[in-house]
Image: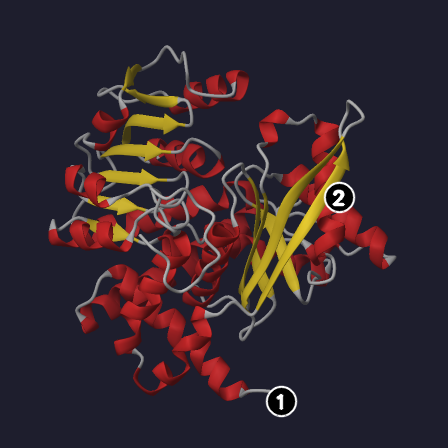
Amino acid sequence: MTNKHSSLSYLDPGRPEPWASFIEQIDRVAPHLGSLSHWIETLKHPKRILVVDVPIVRDDGTIAHYEGYRVQHNLSRGPGKGGVRFHPAVTLNEVMALSGWMTIKNAALGLPFGGAKGGVRIDPRLFSANELERITRRYTSEIGIVIGPDKDIPAPDVGTDQQTMAWMMDTYSMNVGHTASGVVTGKPIALGGSLGRQEATGRGVYIVAREAGIRAGIPISGARVVVQGFGNVGGIAARIFREHGAKVIALQDAEGAIVNPAGIDIPAALAHAAAHGSLSGFFGAEPIGADDFWQLECEYFVPAALEGQVTPQRAQAMRTRIVVEGANGPTTPAADDILRERDILAIPDVLANAGGVTVSYFEWVQDFSSFFWSEEEINIRLESIMTKAFEAVWRTALERQVSIRTAAFIIACQRILAAREQRGLYP
């Protein structure tokens, strides 16, 4: 797919460009926005793009430079909110799209945030803990001019975790001269993190899958589930599916895929992955080829890895009834069309994986008030927000006779562009 909307393309030629996919999704929703479509170009232009050099002294004494980004896509409804990704395939094109999807996601859930995203192009597995700390602190210092508790609030994403957020919070706090716990979310509990945050994205995937299953007549109990990606999102989602009676028959991580038609012991798989760094060698399932993995017959398929994984070819081959997007942007627009033509229900990322940012919102609120909720309260509030958002999107899809994705974009874009219109342009 060529990106006619931006020359900022650094992805491999054979890989779909995320920003082009985002633009196409915006174009598809424009006819449903009425007079607000006057403002649609707002969503095709990120408000602010920061590209930074991240130099560090490596453990062997050499000096190395890495490229980092922070993109604020839209701030009409509140401060920017979105994760920071450490991955060797990070590009500006990707970060732009991820920031755009965060804008839509936050608006679809009714959270008082705009969309932002960041990243550094590194493979964190190739660095020591000390080197990762240096990279994180230098990156935080470089983007410090645009982040803050009321400006832009980063969070963990692929390749980052609560320790990364602790370093980011400390670095920002040292630079501003006081402890600013609300500058990031996804922090350790001891530094103002929220209970329930680590499991929130995977839990949200399960919640929307359950809600979709209720309406589609496909109960979770007894359902076969396939999960691509076995990190924080896919691993936790798989565990919660299993706890509610589903049979997780296949998993895939960066090293390969495994299958067990009788159901995989997810706690054992999680323990194996934690001990060995991947699912490779797990005794409770058999290896399966990538092509065969995408053709497994199941009720729920959860792509929870990276964007652009559900291609038209894979969409044509999939034998599932519901796709629940745990990753950001896993399905290309062309693949989306094929899924719909084949009567495969696709629950979009901007709804399905919004559990993480929802509990990040709770964390941000708790940090400002210095009053913290129990994990039970967190999960109850998460359940309430996500089920209400799902119901609104489902109802809109039925009323407008559009896909669930388009319905989510309609709701989100109406909220974003109404805010833009009411605020006006300054100067």
- Residue 139 image offset from top left, x and y in percent: 70, 47
Whichever of callouts 1 and 2 sits on the residue coming sooner in the sequence is: 2
- The residue that appears at 75% across and 45% down in the rendered structure is 138
**Label 2 CA crowd tier, 10 Å (few <14, some 14–19, many 20+):** many
- The residue that appears at 26% across and 45% down in the rendered structure is 323
Residue in front for this viewpoint, 147 or 227:
147
Query: Mark 1 and mark 2: span between their CA atoms?
Result: 35 Å
- Residue 284 image offset from top left, x and y in percent: 34, 13
Residue in front for this viewpoint, 61 or 232:
61
**Label 1 CA crowd tier, 10 Å (few <14, some 14–19, many 20+):** few
| Residue 196 visible (yes or no) | no
Give the secondary structure at mark 1. Answer: loop
43 in relation to 302, above or below: below
Q: Give the residue type at disc 2.
A: Arg
* Circle 1/circle 2 CB separation < 8 Å: no
- Residue 269 image offset from top left, x and y in percent: 42, 20
246 in relation to 217, above or below: above
Residue in front for this viewpoint, 120 or 387:
120
- Residue farthest along the left direction in this orientation: 342
Q: Give the residue type at disc 1.
A: Pro
- The residue that appears at 33% across and 36% down in the rendered structure is 244
Image-based side of 381 in relation to 31, left or right:
right
Tag nearer the camera, 1 or 2: 1
- Quadrant of image for the C terminus: bottom right
Which residue is labeled 1 in the image? 427
Q: What's the mark number on residue 413?
A: none
Give the secondary structure at mark 2. Answer: helix
In this figure, which colouring scheme has been used for the structure? secondary structure
- Residue 294 image offset from top left, x and y in percent: 23, 32
Which residue is labeled 2 in the image? 137
Image-based side of 137 in relation to 177, left or right:
left
